[in-house]
Amino acid sequence: MSEEPKLHTGKFSKGLTKEYLEQLYLVEYKPIIEISQLTGCSIPMLRQLLSKYKLHRNKSFREAVKCTVKLTKEYLEECYIEQGKSAEQIGKDVDCDGNTVIRRLKEYGISVRSVQETNSKIAHTVTKEQLEELYIVQRLSTIKIGEMLGCTNQTVANALQKFDIPIRTISEANAKILPLLTKEFLEENYIKLQKSTTIIARDLHCNPSTVWDALKLHNIPRWESGTFVAGDKHYGWKGGITNNNKCIDCDKDIWWGAKRCDVCHSVYNSGANNSSWNGGSSFDPYSPAFTTRLKNKIRDRDGHKCRVCGKIESKRKFPVHHIDYNKLNCQTDNLITLCPFCHNQTNSIKTRSLWQVKLTKIITSLLTK
């Protein structure tokens, strides 16, 4: 891993080099939230830097490769139905997003609980002793408890009222945090390191308004909007040049911040200008041996299911994929059945080599049984 840079010596983005972000975001596949916590840089600023450095990754690829193997129908039935875990909790267990879990539940025909049903179930299962330990003894906030239980903070507040556990006022909650927000601490983090109130609040598990109150208490002036990232200090500064909200190709009126209208952008981003361009290989003809009979034979061999995520084929037949991306190689050990979702993920130019290795292992294991 590249050497960790010194952070925030002039503005948020200073020190976050392309190589360092590439290591965290593309190689280690850390979520943006985790990178934000690690670097102290806000999430919007990180997104701007990733866009500036053209560091893009296919989120679905990560989910397909690392998550879908674990998210089998049996696994989801055990965790989601029998154990009653939320989609977010299952996502944390397998290192993916809760929306990925929900999508898999729908694909397997498993009924997804509504927010009200989830909160109602948790409200009936949590005990008074648990809440007293978390809320009174450990003095955790309702937001933190909600994250631990997989529900909203309002559900936790309702459970506290149900068990007659007195809810702390804002002043009482701040009494625990304010002693930590000393003048020296704020000068170091807010002034010197230039962390935002949101970042400081997240580090201390409190509300940004609490940090604002502490700044006012210690007579520390708040930043003006755009103080550190406006004008020539912003990484996107182009010397004051603007297109006056006109398409640079056809001069049509467009939204602020855009360069081209939708039509011109489609033309500009097509063919060799597209990041996924592969020399027009999609137009290459298939081998005459790649017949319907051969594809049905492969589907029969694979049990009419996706060999990556395990989804069962329904009315619509699943695609048969060439593992080495050579349309003329129709050997049975080079063909594999994939669902439309997984098949779409294999077509990313940046991840083809990874998919080829993964699918080769799957088909080798299948044929050697």
Image: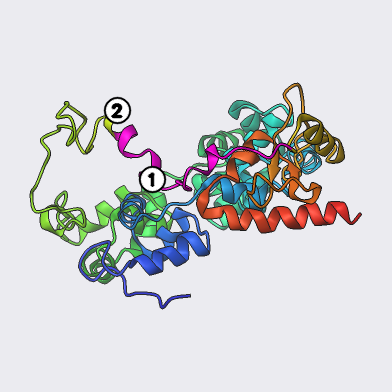
Name the kind of residue labelled 2 in the image: Val
What is the C-alpha distance between the residues marked 1 and 2? 17 Å
Name the kind of residue labelled 1 in the image: Ala
Q: Residues within 10 Å of mark 2 (few under 14, many from 20)?
A: few
Q: Secondary structure at mark 2?
A: helix
Asked if the stretch drawn in magenta spans residue 174, the answer is no
| Left or right of 267 in this view: 9 | left
Q: Nearer the viewer, residue 347 or 101?
A: 347
Residue 64, percent from left and from top = 63, 47
Residue at numbered disc 2: 263
* Residue beneath the point at 85% across and 51% down: 366
Q: Quadrant of the C terminus?
A: bottom right
| Left or right of 164 in this view: 202 | left
Please name the colour scheme applied to the rendered image: rainbow
Q: Secondary structure at mark 1?
A: helix
Asked if the stretch drawn in magenta spans residue 277, the answer is yes
Q: Which mark, residue 272? A: 1
* Residue beneath the point at 46% across and 59% down: 25
Q: Is residue 254 above or below residue 170?
A: above
The answer to whether residue 318 is visible is yes
The magenta region covers 265-288
Residue 315, percent from left and from top = 75, 21
Residue 68, percent from left and from top = 69, 46
| Farthest-out residue, top | 315
